[in-house]
Image: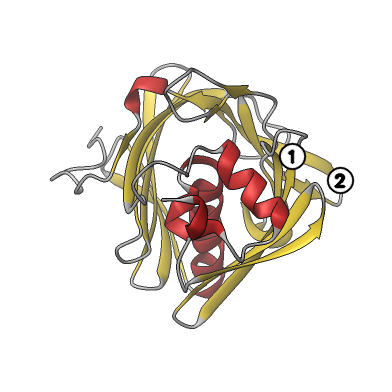
Amino acid sequence: MTDADLAGLPNVVQRYLRFMGVVGRPRDWSFRARFVGRFRRRPDAGWAAAEAWQYNSAVEIARIFCLRIRFAHLVPVLGRDTYAHGHGRLLVKLMGRVTVADGSGEEFDISELITYLNDAVLLAPSMLLGPAASWAQVDDHSFDVTLTDGAHAVTARVFLDQRGAPIDFHADRYANLPSGLALARWRTPVTNWDIVPGRRPLPGPATAVYDLPDGPFPYIEGRFVPGSLAYNIAPGRRECPSR
């Protein structure tokens, strides 16, 4: 990627892409990452230790995200969020065997595509430099980005600091609550960025939050494991743990 590849994009978007280290690197078409932190199912629930593995591809817009939670540090629950061929799905199994949730449909298609967009904004923005994405400046510190895949188009607003580093991402997404699906504002604030010379900037501790009528509901917190990120690689034979 060169400065010429960024010409024509809004100034605030160019500043963001330069902070993210896009210039001087090959355009990304995939990445793999590992995440560690904690998770909870509902606002009044306690937190459980969690770790996740994911693989995202821009060859055809696709995402595999596997979350392993250990309730009471003993019972493993495996959640698998996927987006492929224009469709999203959530599959949750107790101990990797007993299905406790299996969701699909329009709401999951939209929600999973929004999450793919969020991943790209925070970890691999050059995956969005193609005809599927469009950009619009809001002001000197924010922009809107729209991603289209097949029949679906989703839009998010990204907020930046003075450096061009993302500090928040807002979109409307369906919350999968015990009471059912609810459309709500979804955001992923980033408290700081880890910057090491010669490496890509990496979001530090981060969280995902739904703004519900009763107040904010942060449901996952943690950080990406620095050495786990790998770019421009083919998917492995098994992206998710079985237990």
Tell me the SS state at disc 1: strand
Question: Mark 1 — residue?
Answer: 217
Which amino acid type corresponds to the residue marked 2 in the rendered image?
Asp
Q: Please tell me whether residue 12 is drawn above or below residue 32 in the rendered image.
A: below
Question: Mark 2 — residue?
Answer: 214
Position of residue 151 measured from the top left corner of the image (x, y, whole percent): 49, 83
Can residue 225 be seen in this snapshot? yes
Position of residue 140 measured from the top left corner of the image (x, y, whole percent): 82, 50
Say which mark, if any, is on residue 1. none
Closest to the observer, 204 or 135 = 135
The span from disc 1 to disc 2 (Cα, nearest Å) is 9 Å
- Please tell me which residue is depicted at 63% across the width and 36% down the height of the picture: 219
Which amino acid type corresponds to the residue marked 1 in the rendered image?
Phe
Q: Residue furthest bottom?
A: 151
- Please tell me which residue is depicted at 16% across the width and 44% down the height of the picture: 236
Label 1: how many Cα within 10 Å (few below 14, some 14–19, many 20+): some
Q: Tell me, yes or no, whether the two marked residues, 1 and 2, touch with CB atoms within 8 Å.
A: yes
